[in-house]
Image: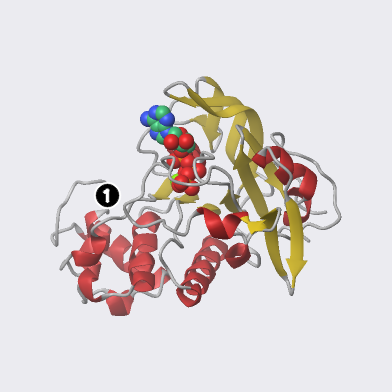
Amino acid sequence: MNTPRRQGSSGTSPVLELDRVTLELGDRTILRDTSFTINQGEFIGVLGPNGAGKTTLMRSVLGLVPAANGTVRVLGEPVVRGNPSIGYMPQTRSALAGRRVRGRDFVAMAADGHRWGLPHADAKARADVDRVLELVGGSALAARPLSELSGGERQRLLLAQCLLGNPRLLLLDEPLISLDPHHQKTVVELVKRVQQELGIAVLFSAHELNPLLHALDRVLYLGNGVAALGTVDEVITKPVLSRLYGSTIDVMRVNGRIFVMSGDFDVEKHDHEHEDDDHQHGEPHGHGHSHGHAHGSKETHHHASRDGHTHDV
Ligand SMILES: Nc1ncnc2c1ncn2[C@@H]1O[C@H](COP(=O)(O)OP(=O)(O)OP(=O)(O)O)[C@@H](O)[C@H]1O
Ligand SMILES: [Mg+2]
């Protein structure tokens, strides 16, 4: 298993570092004393049951949830709001489906902050919109209204929005929600291609590991206030996941797919089925813990909440 380091990225330069970070929301501790490092050019699958803190972690990287303790750094600097080095696709993408706005204008709305509303951008912003549309293979969607696009096509435009301004780190929160398996595959492949082409790092949260298996370099698995970062073989194991779920988890591999089971219950499958676009903060709708993977078989139970790098096993 090796970790391709992309061209254009300087060796193992850190893009995202958590140094003994604790995240709290209200009186809940979402992440406790967690340290890890994600490097330029890495595709990280962010997994964990409903409410594990995937969205909260991304929001902390954006400077929207301050760390109660410790430091979050992006490209070596403490987080700031509105960091142009970060592209963000939020989990909540409600109401897009009904919009008549043209694809291109939709992408353009996100260009250059909110400085311009609809069609009249300056030349530089227009060129950037063209660039990102091309990058995601979305030029053909530019003239069509959002309301006429499929979920997968809208995802393409959302990804284009995230790429405006040349970010080095993409935070994609559940881009696969409400997509069928075919479109899920398309979206994963698209993100992977763009990520490799640009040599940028991606945090891609998802409810299921399997659609990401071939794309990801490492997994960041959250649960119980703990984070496990490592290769699939390192993280998707009985000891690591049992710790994250707080109960016995079995990991099974079947035909190249991985299932994470609690008893005879596929935790991932069960977890987020009822998700929809309007779901935001992992409210207690889920069954607290669930996920399903299964890769890992042998392998170190390096459990995680520490040092990022463990790529190559
Ligand atoms: N403002 C808040 N005050 C207290 N708790 C909150 C607040 N916002 C969110 N939470 C809780 O924080 C926990 C983490 O939520 P978060 O949305 O980060 O989880 P998630 O892993 O993204 O879940 P999902 O898979 O459902 O999207 C959840 O239990 C949620 O209910
Ligand atoms: Mg979430």
Residue 278 in view here: yes
Residue drawn at x 60%, y 35% is 17
Q: Residues within 10 Å of mark 1 (few under 14, many from 20)?
A: some
Query: Relative to 302, is 120 on the left or the right?
Result: left
Quarter of image, res 304 = top right
Residue 64 in view here: no
Query: Relative to 51, is 212 on the left or the right?
Result: right
Residue 55, percent from left and from top: 46, 42
Q: In which quarter of the image is ligand 1?
A: top left
State yes or no: Cβ of the residue under disc 1 lies below 8 Å from any atom of ligand 2: no
* Residue position marked by numbered label 1 in the rendering: 112
Quarter of image, res 129 = bottom left
Above or below 14: residue 256? below
Tell me the amino acid under the disc marked 1: Asp
Q: Quick one: quadrant of the N terminus? A: bottom right
Task: Out of 239 and 62, give the one closest to the viewer.
Answer: 239
Task: Out of 233 and 137, give the one closest to the viewer.
Answer: 233
Residue 73, percent from left and from top: 54, 32
Secondary structure state at the residue bearing disc 1: loop
Residue 204, percent from left and from top: 52, 54
Task: Out of 107 and 50, give the one closest to the viewer.
Answer: 50
